[in-house]
Image (spheres, rainbow, N blue to C red):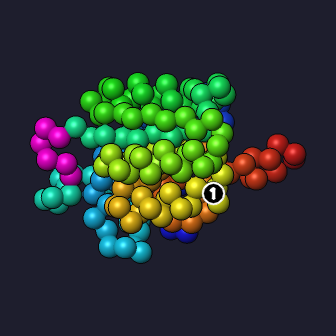
Amino acid sequence: MSRTGVLSAPRSRRHSLCAAAVLLALCVGLTACSAAPSGSAPSGPAPSGPEPSGSVPSAGKVLSIGLSVPTLANPYFAGVEHGVRERTSQLGYQLTERAANNDISMQLKQIDELIGMKVDAIVVVPIDSDGIVPAVKQANAANVPMIALDRDVNAGQVVFIGSNNVELGAKGAD
């Protein structure tokens, strides 16, 4: 698995909304990463300062972000969706939202649809870390940056924003 970055945060609603804002800020930098050769992963934070010519959307182009969450019946995921929607609106991005009703096959179809819509980046809260791999590989092949939120993905190129639940559990047990 190749990662372009990992951020950790406690699992509170406030932090999930902050994470959503951070990940959308990353989307701008990640569009430059989509030009990376297959199999190579950008490393480190998104560069600051002027971007190389051709690596960012042309002036006037509205960035489109796809969002796939497991469900909106869970307040945590509803909060994530709300935070992403607010932040994309503030940034002037177009957001296409999908909720998969906790069905991994539906989530795979939704991500396929988002790729077909030629979104600039996809934010996903995977239902299953292994089950989502085909969609991640498909997005990688289409040069669509993927951001996994809350749950990591077990293969492919992704930016993961979430917490280490094993580490948090160990600390909680102490």
Q: Taking 127 as reference, is 134 left or right?
A: left
Q: What residue appears at the point 87 percent right and 47 percent down from the top-left corner?
A: 174
Height in image: 124 above or below 95? Answer: below
The location of residue 81, given as percent across then percent down, is 51, 30
Which of the two residues, 102 or 46, is positioned nearer the viewer here?
102
- Does residue 104 appear anywhere in the picture? yes
Label 1 residue SS:
loop
The location of residue 45, given as percent across then percent down, is 39, 56
Q: Name the residue under label 1.
A: 131
Q: What residue appears at the point 58 percent right and 38 percent down from the top-left corner?
A: 100
Q: Taking 171 as reference, is 34 left or right?
A: left
Image quadrant where one finds the N terminus: bottom right
Q: What residue appears at the point 57 percent right and 44 percent down from the top-left corner?
A: 106
Height in image: 174 above or below 130? Answer: above
Q: How crowded is mark 1: few (under 14 residues within 10 Å), some or many (20 or more)?
A: some
Q: Taking 38 as reference, is 13 left or right?
A: right
Q: What residue appears at the point 80 percent right and 47 percent down from the top-left corner?
A: 169
The location of residue 82, given as percent across then percent down, is 49, 25
Count of numbered circles on the image: 1
In the rendered structure, does residue 2 fall within the stretch colored magenta? no
Type of amino acid at the residue the image marks with label 1: Gly
Q: Is the magenta stretch mostly helix, strand or loop?
A: loop
Residues rendered magenta in the picture:
56-61
Which of the two residues, 86 or 70, is positioned nearer the viewer here?
70
The location of residue 70, given as percent across then percent down, is 61, 38
Tell which residue pokes out farthest to the right in this image. Answer: 173
